[in-house]
Amino acid sequence: MRKWIMGMLMLKLAASAASFAETTCQNGYGHVTCQKGKVSSIQANGFSTLQGTIVEGHTQVNGSLEADHATLKTVTVNGSASFHHSTIQGDARFNGSLNAVETRFHSSLTIASNSVDFKTCEFDKKIHELQSRKLLFMPPTKKFLLETQHKIMRSIASGNKHFNLL
């Protein structure tokens, strides 16, 4: 009897864990919506929304991605991307428009776009790489890094569509 109760309890716990994983992301025709929770990876075609989601693997979106308070390991977006208060821990590649507000990029950022907008974002890539590309000539203060962002944005706006930031 005791083994049967323990078996039923383990089955119940496994079922509740599986239902939690299923409820983190909802897939529909042409859209993926993920709420607060962890997912292993995301592969989506169409419109994707992440609200407080932690993606432990790669995120691949062909379409539109909106992320708010999300943490992503690596990301590739072919289309438009919008990040608010989010963190990208690994490499990021954007082929299309990018809008980022108070977002932290921990690794390399590759952009091929006509429309890029950064507002109070942080870039943690090695400072010596910025210096070697002659983008940083003095100690990295926030003011100077913001000025560097403006230089990059002017470069993109003047027609440089393939700009590898770091």
Image: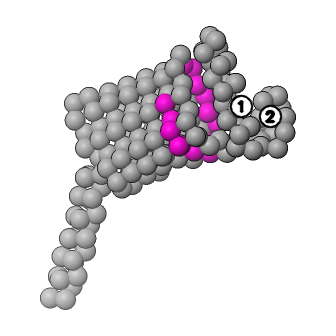
Q: Which residue is drawn at 32% across and 45% down?
A: 34
* Residue furthest left as drawn: 1
- Check the image and report above or below for 118 versus 87: above
- The quarter of the image holding the N terminus is bottom left
**Quarter-of-image position of residue 126:** top right
Q: Position of residue 77 (x, y in %)?
A: 47, 29
| Highlighted magenta segment, given as a residue range | 99-113
Question: Is 4 positioned to the left or the right of 130 in the image?
Answer: left
Residue at 74% x, 37% y is: 144
User: Compared with residue 159, is residue 95 higher up or lower down, i.e. above or below?
Assistant: below
Badge 2 density bin: few <14, some 14–19, many ≥20, Cα 10 Å: some
Task: State whether the magenta stretch is mostly helix, strand or loop.
Answer: strand
The disc label shown at residue 136, or none: 2
Asked whether disc 2 touches disc 1, contact meaning CB atoms under 8 Å apart, the reply is yes
Q: In which quarter of the image is residue 43?
A: top left
Q: Residue type at mark 2: give it.
A: Leu
